[in-house]
Image: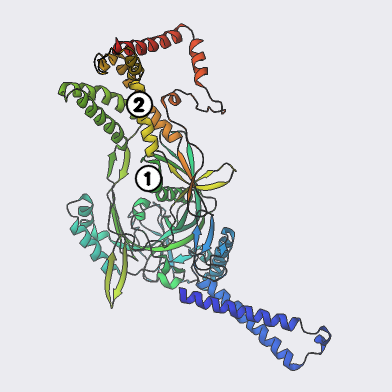
Amino acid sequence: MYKNNEKNKNNANNNDKVKKSDIKINNSDGAERGYATKQDTKKKSAATASHGADAEKKKSDRESRTPLVVYCKKCNAPAGFDIVHQTYRCKYCHEVTGIEDAKEEIIKWKALNRDARLKAANTGITEMICPKCHARVLFGNNEASEVCVFCKSKLIRRDLSDPSHMPDLIIPFFITKDEAKQRLKTWADEHRRTPEGKAVLSNMNHFCGYYLPYQIVKGPVNARVSRDGTFRGYECGGYLEGTAVGTSKQLDNLVLNDMEPFDWAEAKAFEYGYIAGQPVKLNDSTETEVVSRVRREVEADFEPVVRKVMQTKNVNISIRDERLDSISALLPVYFISSGKLTAVMNGQTGRIAVSTGRSRKTYPWVKEPLIYTIAVALISGAFSGWSAEMMFYATMVFGLIFFCAMGQDKDAVIERICLKSETSKARRDGSALVIDEKNNILKNPYDNTPVFYEYNQEGKRVPVHIRFYTVGRILYSIYNTLVMIFLPALLAAPLRLCVMEPGETFAENFHIEYGAAWYVLTVMCAVIYYIKGLRIDAYENPIIYEFLENGKKKLMEKPAALSFFYMLGINRPDKNGNVMTKKELFNLIMHSGQEGCLLFGGVLFILLGSTLAMVF
């Protein structure tokens, strides 16, 4: 590829030389233009011929290029997408190629290759359609099947589709049918104790190979994401580097996803010669169905990063894909489709994915209340001298509270079970097939990890790093909890110093255990504080750092202090931006009637009573 790029550079330089030569000719003395010599005429004719040859060369280069790669408009090297600045940038000369420039190149490429397909339209192709599942299939001469491999119905011959509607790209089969069948059988033998392995072994007679229809989606994509149980949303942007979306209704798209990726470097402009000897299934999905599948694919690509940032599997992702480009393609797939079994193998790389429709339920939300319950059990044991009875009661009471509060509106996560082999890449050692298996063996050389965005104080959309828990925030919450629980002891300590008799130690007659009434009240408040204040308020008030041009991070704004009073609404902005102070809260309680006064008086009585009981 890079040799071609060097070749393109030389062509570009030649073009520049021709243009400069033209300028010199056109800028010659105007008085002599009407009296050009035969030599001048020959030079002009040579320059015109050179222009024509260069134009044909540019057209040929554009046809031979793959539209899955954006090339630098300056040096013709592959350009990667700069997610932060939302543009294409060359990693060699750092030239910027705009999104619209990339779209224009794809449009030109499609137009050129559509014309080539029309010229090479092959009438030796037979098109069949299934009246039951509506599958549309192409066969070569004398290769037509009478039975649909997807639903086993009888196929009906129909007129050949317009060649202009054929796919833009094709990746040829690299693995032969016999090699693929043996590889799948070997895999099934290794997994014969699983339902998937058993199903494959008993259905090997349904094994077949097809070119399946796909839409190759590429370009920048944005999404609105949020954490389940919170109201705040976040902007997230990323880039799809050739995401393949199956457009066949008859096969499980989730299983097809698991046999990816393909090696896009081997993608070629569609020609009828590539499909000789292999049946072709045409697209039978509507545009609405394709868009829906694309969004599900993008969500699946975004999910790992969003889950990691949001610190939960329960996330909501809403995709906005108005700037995506799609290119139709035929991709090589061997498969078995029988009943609930869908077994597929990548006909280019040899990767296998198998599903029998099984699924499993997980309850990720259980971890958090379980951790809190264990913490309470250990704390109660430490304060009770590891009394089994006290630990049991504390665990039961607080465990019930934690699981009820944290499990509210939480559902099980249902995950499809699909067994798959490692990412693979096929090659030939002489005539022998060799398949190398390694995680990320076809990894994209560019970093397309989704990035989160926020608007800074200047109103500029900037990339950010989001955190919810820091060491400082955790220590602050512990400090708030201890102060709230041991407030009577903190008030009683200076009072004890004032009433101490000469020769008396501080610990004498200082009974910290007499604050039991206050401890019971505040421990319950602390539980609410940790459930509400740290689980909800922390995710509603993230700590956001802005990424600067020099690679460093800057705190965008001071995060809210998640104190017990903040949980009650003090210093918390409402929807209109208004903030309630402690004084306003006190006035609200005092003017709320008899109930408010009794509540305030009861809390104050317990506090003062516990404080005095410790000293006197």
Task: For marks 2 and 1, give the CA distance.
Answer: 28 Å
| Amino acid type, label 1 | Lys
Instruction: Specify the label residue 308 is tagged with.
Output: 1
Q: Tag 1: Cα neighbours inside 10 Å, few (<14), some, or many (≥20)?
A: few
Q: Which mark is nearer the camera, 2 or 1?
A: 2
Helix, strand or loop under label 1: helix
Which image quadrant for residue 56? bottom right
Please indicate whether residue 456 sits to the left or right of residue 450 in the image.
right
- Which residue is under mark 2? 481
Residue 196: which numbered mark, if any? none
Q: Amino acid at mark 2?
A: Thr
Viewer-side residue, 530 vs 112: 530
Q: Earlier in the sequence, mark 2 or mark 1?
A: 1
Q: Is residue 466 above or below residue 534?
A: below
Query: In this view, which residue lies farthest toward the top?
Result: 594
| Quadrant of the snapshot with the N terminus | bottom left
Q: Quadrant of the C terminus?
A: top left
Q: Position of residue 510 (x, y in %)?
A: 27, 15
**Residue found at x 54% / y 57%:** 87
Instruction: Point out residue 42 in the picture as x, y percentages from the top left corner.
Output: 70, 90
- Residue at x 47% of width, y 24% of height: 569
Q: Which residue lies at the image location 52% right of the left edge and 67% below the top edge?
A: 71
Establish if 218 lies above or below 458.
below
- Give the secondary structure at mark 2: helix
